[in-house]
């Protein structure tokens, strides 16, 4: 009898989805005032949109992150939230080829 991979359904050859880990209290990057913007696709991008809409000026990713943290749109969990913001915005610009709402 052939061995099955752990987590497989066994009947149709497709693996079943991995169980989701329960959310830990206090481990969210979404702040109390932060709500997801429809179509924005991510907490960091949603926070960036809110900050840019409020200030209506060009900013660096460091400035956006600093203001998002101060205003409660983000709660920093890692050591480098600025790098995460920069990565999220850069990836959005690169993947959407001119249709991104962000610019470099």
Image (cartoon, rainbow, N blue to C red):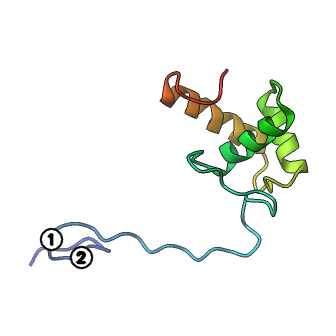
Element type where label 2 sits in the image: loop
Left or right relative to 71: residue 9: left
Q: Which mark is residue 3?
A: none
Residue at 32%, 74% in the rendered image: 7
Query: For residue 89, which quarter of the picture?
Result: top right
Frontmost residue, 53 versus 90: 53
Left or right relative to 90: residue 3: left
Q: Which mark is residue 12?
A: 1
Frontmost residue, 18 versus 102: 102
Quadrant for the C terminus in the image: top right
- Crowd rating for badge 1 (residues with CA inside 10 Å; few <14, some 14–19, many 20+): few
Where is residue 2? Give x, y as percent. Answer: 12, 74
Where is residue 14? Give x, y as percent. Answer: 22, 66
- Crowd rating for badge 2 (residues with CA inside 10 Å; few <14, some 14–19, many 20+): few
Residue at 40%, 70% in the rendered image: 18
Element type where label 1 sits in the image: loop
Frontmost residue, 93 versus 84: 93
Residue under label 2? 9
Left or right relative to 18: residue 49: right
Quadrant for the N terminus in the image: bottom left
Label 1 close to label 2 by CB (< 8 Å)? yes
Give the CA separation, mark 1 to mark 2. Answer: 7 Å
Vertically, is 19 above or below 93? below
């Amino acid at each position: 009898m052939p061995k099955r991979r752990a987590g497989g359904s066994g009947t149709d050859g497709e693996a079943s989805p991995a169980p989701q880990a329960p959310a830990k209290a206090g481990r969210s990057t979404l702040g109390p005032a932060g709500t997801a913007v429809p179509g924005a696709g991510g907490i960091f991008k949603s926070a960036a949109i809110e900050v840019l809409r409020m200030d209506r000026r060009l900013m660096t990713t460091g400035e956006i992150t600093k203001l998002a943290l101060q205003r409660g749109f983000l709660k920093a969990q890692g050591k480098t939230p600025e790098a995460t913001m920069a990565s999220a915005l850069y990836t959005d610009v690169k993947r959407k080829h001119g249709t991104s709402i962000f610019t470099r």
